[in-house]
Image (cartoon, rainbow, N blue to C red):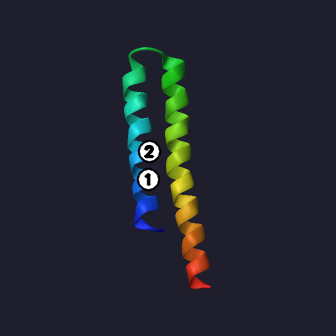
Amino acid sequence: MSKRMSLFFAVFSVLLMSATAISISYNGWLAALFFLLTIGSIGTGFVVGAKMRRRKQG
């Protein structure tokens, strides 16, 4: 995965984590939504990285 794409996934995930932390005090359902989006973003980053690594190898 390129450095720019890695940086994008890292920054986006940190922003979602921050939104989760802030929303905990306001609304539990909103915090749960941001939590799921954070997990999805991190998982997508891993999947994209693995697919790009496989394409590069073979």
Going by the picture, which residue comes out furthest to the bottom? Answer: 58
- Residue 44: percent from the left, percent from the top? 56, 53
Vertical order, 47 against 32 (above or below): below
Q: Amino acid at mark 2?
A: Phe
Secondary structure beneath dot 1 equals helix
Residue identifier under label 1: 8
Q: Which of 3 and 47 lies nearest the eye of the viewer?
A: 3
Secondary structure beneath dot 2 equals helix
Number of other residues with Cα within 10 Å of mark 2, as a class: few under 14, some 14 to 19, many 20 or more? some
Q: How much space separates mark 2 and mark 1, taking CA atoms? A: 6 Å
Vertical order, 55 against 1 (above or below): below
Number of other residues with Cα within 10 Å of mark 1, as a class: few under 14, some 14 to 19, many 20 or more? few
Going by the picture, which residue comes out furthest to the front? Answer: 4
Per the rendering, the mark at residue 53 is none
Describe residue 33's horizontal placement relative to residue 5 as left or right. right
- Residue 21: percent from the left, percent from the top? 37, 28
Residue sitting at 56 percent across and 80 percent down?
56
Q: Amino acid at mark 1?
A: Phe
Going by the picture, which residue comes out furthest to the top? Answer: 26
- Residue 13: percent from the left, percent from the top? 43, 44
The reply to whether callout 2 and callout 1 are in contact (CB within 8 Å) is yes
Residue sitting at 49 percent across and 50 percent down?
42
Residue sitting at 40 percent across and 38 percent down?
15
Q: Quadrant of residue 4?
A: bottom left
Vertical order, 27 against 7 (above or below): above
Residue identifier under label 2: 12
Classify the position of the C terminus by image quarter: bottom right
Residue sitting at 52 percent across and 43 percent down?
39
